[in-house]
Image (cartoon, coloured by chain):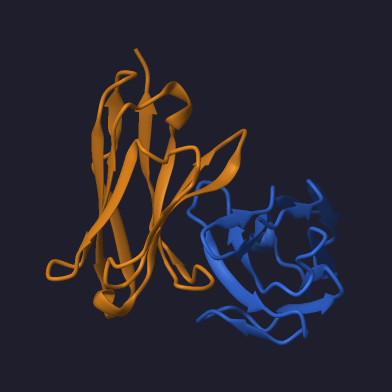
Chain colours: A orange, B blue
């Protein structure tokens, strides 16, 4: 069955860096567009970034542009989000999600807390 | 960039039906949307993709009680024969060339 398993969340100080990963299985990862979406209690769901199946097209939300980098390894079926210059308001549950049009599958999420 | 507007809350009785609304901003009334359900403490789950024609495609395992429809800029999610497990947050989603947006979500309470 389709599975997306995030890992790498944790506590980091403001200005710090963190990389979260998403291991995919049960579907053809190399032909699937993938997203990172985050959620906070007050802001709801916020799209963060998208990467096309081959990595040839990447988009970011304005709130993370220049600080976050999405990437993928199609030989290892893994999606990554490198987060630099982290701010307190980046604190959220980060979900990886599949979909080139509608998001049609979500991972279980990993919590990133930015705090001093 | 499109904006999606949802009512913050809704309620309906066990066994009854409820219709949730997601409204697309001006100039975006033809956009396709998706509906997602998030039960308390869980990750979101994809329910369906819904076109402006009213045609919809549900995700795997989504009960027949869930259906979609459209009228102009409004996209609807109807849940029939409400069950206790339907108590959840419901989000709509749409996308443009370089961005993706979510509505603020509707919290559904089953009475």
Quadrant in the rendering for residue A52 = bottom left
Image coords of residue B74 (percent x, y): 83, 68
Image coords of residue B54 (percent x, y): 77, 84
Closer-to-camera residue (A96/B14): A96
Closer-to-camera residue (B101/B89): B101
Image coords of residue A65 (percent x, y): 41, 41
Is there any visible trace of residue B2 in the rendered image? yes
Q: Is residue B76 left or right of residue B33?
A: right
Q: Residue furthest left?
A: A75
Q: Is residue A27 left or right of residue B49?
A: left
The quadrant the C terminus of chain A occupies is top left
Q: Is residue A116 left or right of residue B64?
A: left
Identified at 71% across, 66% down, the residue is B83
Identified at 26% across, 66% down, the residue is A24
Identified at 68% across, 53% down, the residue is B103
Image coords of residue A17 (percent x, y): 25, 30
């Amino acid at each position: 069955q389709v599975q997306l398993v995030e890992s790498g969340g944790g506590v980091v100080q403001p200005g710090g860096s963190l990389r979260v990963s998403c291991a995919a299985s049960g579907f053809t990862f190399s032909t699937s567009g993938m997203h990172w979406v985050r959620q906070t209690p007050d802001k709801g769901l916020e799209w963060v970034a998208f990467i096309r199946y081959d990595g040839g097209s990447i988009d970011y939300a304005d709130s993370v542009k220049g600080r976050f980098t999405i990437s993928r390894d199609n030989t290892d079926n893994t999606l990554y989000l490198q987060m630099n210059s982290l701010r307190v308001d980046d604190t959220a549950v980060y979900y990886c999600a599949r979909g080139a049009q509608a998001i049609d599958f979500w991972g279980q999420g990993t919590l990133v807390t930015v705090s001093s | 960039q499109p904006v999606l507007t949802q009512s913050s809350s809704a309620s309906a009785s066990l066994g009854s039906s409820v219709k949730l609304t997601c409204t697309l901003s001006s100039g975006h009334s033809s956009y396709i949307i998706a509906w997602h359900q998030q039960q308390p403490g869980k990750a979101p789950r994809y329910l369906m993709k819904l076109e402006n024609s009213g045609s919809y495609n549900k995700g795997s395992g989504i009960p027949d009680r869930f259906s979609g429809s459209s009228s102009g800029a409004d996209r609807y999610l109807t849940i029939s024969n409400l069950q206790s497990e339907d108590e959840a947050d419901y989000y709509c989603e749409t996308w443009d060339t370089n961005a993706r947006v979510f509505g603020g979500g509707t919290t559904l309470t089953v009475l």
